[in-house]
Image: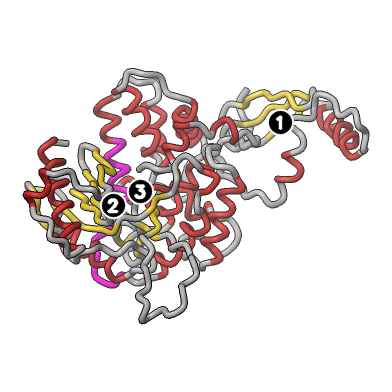
Amino acid sequence: MQCPKCRAPMHTYNRNGVQIEQCSGCRGIFLDYGELESLTRLESQWAQPAPPAPPAAPAAPAAPQAYPAAPQPPAWGAPHAGHYGHRRHKSFGHMLFSS
Amino acid sequence: MPPDLLRALTAHVTATAHAHARDSVSVSDTERPCPCPAGTLTARDDTTVVHHAGTVAKAHAPGTDRDHLTPRLGTAAHLPGILLPPLAPTPVDLRGRLVTHWPHGTPVDPDDPDAAPWEAAATLLARLHRTPPPVPVPPMRGPAKAAHAVAALRATAPGHPATAPVLHAWATLPAWARGVAPMPDTATLCHGDFHLGQLVRPPAVTPTPALAPAPAPAREAPWLLIDIDDLGTGVPAWDLARPAAWYACGLLAPDEWHRFLTAYRTARGPAVPPDGDPWTTLDVPARALTAQTAARAVAKAVAADRPLDEVERSLVDACARMEAVRPSSPPD
C-alpha cells in the first residue's frame, strides 16, 4: 500500500504478532483497527516482571532503552533495528576507510 | 599507475629519508637492500604513496594544479595541531607528477572499527572549521568529487538497475552540492574528504635530555588529519556527512554517530546548530555522499562483474528512498 502522507510504498512488519505497516519514505506507521489495543496489551505485559517473555524477546530489549537518547536519522534513512553486528563485515569496514 | 613511477618514487623517498636523517647513504647504496622499514602505502590509478623509515612521499593525481596544492600544503604547515605538517613546504616534480613529503604516522586500524577515534576526529574537524584559513585556499573539492563519481557511474553503468535510483537522488540535490554552482559558504576551512583513513598519529617526538631531564611520561601522540588534496573553503557539514550518511543508511550504529556528533558540538563546531536537529544542515551533504558512495560501489561492482553486496545495496536503497522525501532546501 501507499503512504497516505508522502505516497511512498509501505512495508508490512510483524511486531510481536501485530501486523504494522511502515512507510519506506517518511517512516510513519499505519495501524489497522484493533492493532493499537493489541500493542497496548503487549506493552502492559512487558511492564510486568513475568519471566515467560516468549517469542517477543529478541526485538524488544533494545528499543525502549535506546529510544530516548538515540538521535533520529533523516526521513530517507534506513530503519535502525539494532542489527549492526552482522553488517560489520569487511565491506563496511573498508567503506569507513575510503573516499 | 605506471610501474616506473613507483620505482622512481621509491628511490626518491629512500634518498629523501636518508638525506633527512643526515645519513651518508648514496644512491648507489640502493643496490644493497636497505635495513629500514619501507613499503607502498597506496597505489591507486591516480595516487601513489610510499614510505621509507619515517618519511612518506605522495605522488598526487596527474593534473593536480601546483597553484592549488601549494596553499593547501601551506595550510597544513600552519595548523600543526590539526593537520599533519608536511616535511617540506612545497611540492617537487617527479616524472611529471607533484610529490609532497610527510612524516610517517600510525593510521586507525581498519580491522578494529570499535577502536575508531570518533571523538578525536570530530574535535579535529570542529577545530579546523573554527580556524580562519591561514593562507588563501581554493574551494574544497567535496562536491566536485561527488559529481565526478556520479558522472563515472552514468558513463560506465547506464543500464544497471541500481544506476537510476542513484541518478534520481543526485538530481534532487541543490546545484552547489552537485558541484555546478559555488557553495553557499566560501569562508569556512574544510577537509573536503573526511573518513577514518584520514587520521594518523604522528611519530612520537623524543625529548632531548637537556629539555626533559626527567623521563617524559609515555603518552600517545594525538590524532591528526591527513590528505590535503581536497582541503579548502566551503560548507563544513560536508566533512560530517560521510559518518552521517553511514548512519542514515543503517551502517553506523546510533551510539557511534551520537558520540561523533556530540564531540563535534562540544568542540563548538559550526557545521550544525549547537542543539536541536542537526539534519537541517546535514541532510543535503549526507544525501550527496550517499549518492557518491553508491555511485562508486555500483561502478566497482559492474567493473568486477559481480552483484552488489549487502552494504552496497543499503546505499542504493537509501538513494531510492530519497526520491520520496525531497531535500529541505529547494534545488537552486
Vertical order, B31 against A45 (above or below): below
- Segment tinted magenta in the rendering: B133-150
Tell me residue B280's x, y (percent).
51, 54
User: Amino acid type of disc 1?
Assistant: Phe
User: Within 10 angstroms of label 2, few (less than 14), some, or many (20 or more) residues?
Assistant: many
Vertical order, B179 against B221 (above or below): above
Magenta stretch: residue B143 in it?
Answer: yes
- Labels 2 and 3: the sequence-earlier one: 2
Q: Residue at x 28, y 29 (%)?
A: B154
Q: Are marks 1 and 2 in contact (CB under 8 Å)?
A: no
Asked whether residue A70 is in view, the answer is yes
Badge 1 and badge 2 both on one subunit: no
> Disc 1 sits on a residue from what chain?
A
Q: Residue at x 29, y 60 (%)?
A: B232
Q: Nearer the viewer, residue B277 or B14?
A: B14
Tell me residue A62's x, y (percent).
72, 39
Secondary structure category for the residue under label 3: helix
| Closer to the eye: label 1 or 2 | 2
Secondary structure category for the residue under label 2: loop
Name the residue tied to disc 1. A30
> Disc 2 sits on a residue from what chain?
B
